[in-house]
Image: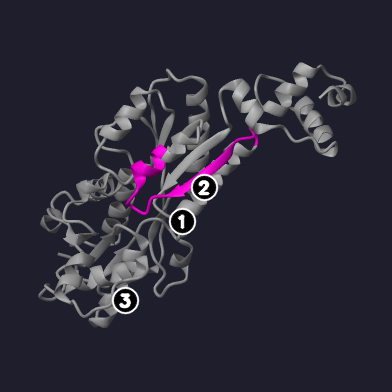
Amino acid sequence: MDEIARQAGVSKTTVYRALSGQGRIGESTRRRVLDIAERAGYRPNRLARGLRRARTGLIGVVVPGIEGQFYARLLEGVEKALQDVDHRVLLTMSRGQREYELVESLLDMQVDGLIVASETDEPEFYTRLLERRVPIVFIDREVPGLHADLVATDHFQGGVLLGEHLRERGYRRPAFLSMTDSPRRIGSVEDRWCGFRSVFRNAALLEFPFVASAERYQEDHPEAPQPETFSELCRHAVAGALEPLDGFPYDSVFAQYDHFALALIDALKAAGLRVPEDVGVVGFDDHDFTGYTEPSLTTIRQPLREIGLQAARRLLERIEEPDLPAAALRLPPRLIARRSSEPLAAKEQP
C-alpha cells in the first residue's frame, strides 16, 4: 500500500479509500489508484478486510431459477451496481421449494445483505429477519403484509397499458388467463389483473379470471407425460383451460406470462381460431422470442436490468444506514405492440 501511495502521490488513507470503496475521494484519484494497484498486481485480502469492517463484501441473492432470461437480465443489473464497490454476489435458486433454508444458509455465510425474489405469501419469516435488522431488498413482487424495501415493475400500470391497448383496437370481450384460481396468490399478477380490469370495468367476463391449471390437466389426463419445461407446463395448463369451454366466448385474452400467451396461441390455432383475426392475445415480460413468433406477440417490457441495479443500490444504502424507512420503488413498464393484437377494424363491434 505504501508503494501504491508513493506512485499515486497520495496518502495511504486515500489509497485505502480507493481500494475499499469506503469514504469519499475524487473519481480521477480513485481511478489512478486502482490503475496503479492493478499494474502492481495488488489483490486485497477480502476476509481480513471484512473482519476489520465486520463485513464480508458478499451479497446474497435468492431467485426462483435462471432458466429463462428474466432473472438473468435482472442479475446483470445487480452485478453492475456491485462491481464498482468491490462486492460479490452469492446466487442461490429456490425453485419454489427451499427459499427459507437458502436464506438462512446465506446468512450463515455472513453476507452483508440479501436481494430476494420471494415466492412466499407468508411474511412471518422475513418479519423476524427485519426485526434482527438484516438488510433485505425484495425484487419483482412484494411479500403480502411485509413492510420492507421493494424494487419492481409497476404491474398495475402494465395491466392498464394492455387494457387500453385492446380497448382502443376494438376488443370488447376480454379475458385474463391466470395459472391460479385467484391471482391474489401472486401479488404481481393480482396487480396486472386489477389494472386490466380497471379499463374494462363493465366486462362481466373479467369478474373471475379464465383459469389454466397444469395440475388439473394432469389429473384429467394421467397418461400425459409430466412437463419438463415451463413451456410444456404452460401448454398443459392452457389445454386444461380450453377443454371445458363450449366454443370460445372471448375476443381477446391477456395471458399473465409470455409463455402462457404463446401456448394459448398454439391451442387456438389447433382449434381453428385465428390470432388476431378471431382472438387478440397479449402477454407480459417481452422475452426475446416474442418478436419472432407467428404472429409476433404484443406484450409488456419490464425494465429488468434497472430493477436489479436499483435493488443493489438500495441494499448498499440499507447496509450503510440500517434505520432508513422502508420504501417501494415501482418502475414504469413499456407497451410493445405487435401483430397478435392488431385492430378489429373489420369486425362489427357490439
Mark 3, mark 2: which one is toward the viewer?
Answer: 2
Query: Is residue 343 in view from this perspective?
Result: no
Residue for badge 3: 266
Work out whether mark 2 precedes mark 1 in sequence or the reverse, and give the earlier one: 1
Which of labels 1 and 3 is toward the front? Answer: 1
Q: Alpha-carbon distance for marks 1 and 3?
A: 25 Å
At x 37% / y 68%, what residue is drawn? Answer: 229
Local crowd size for mark 3, using a 10 Å CA cut-off: few (<14), some (14–19), many (≥20)? some
Tell me the kind of residue under disc 1.
Answer: Ile
Asked if the residue under mark 1 is in contact with the one under mark 2, i.e. CB atoms within 8 Å, the reply is yes
Per the image, the residue denoted by label 1 is 66
Residue 347 vertical position relative to residue 300 in the rendered view, above or below: below
C-alpha separation, residue under disc 3 versus residue under disc 2: 31 Å
Instruction: Assign the C terminus to one quadrant of the image.
Output: bottom left
**Residue sitting at x 43%, y 40%:** 105
Q: Amino acid at mark 2?
A: Leu
Q: Amino acid at mark 3?
A: Asp
Q: Nearer the viewer, residue 279 or 235?
A: 235
Who's the residue at 85% across and 22% down the image? 2
**Which residue sits at x=31%, y=71%?**
227
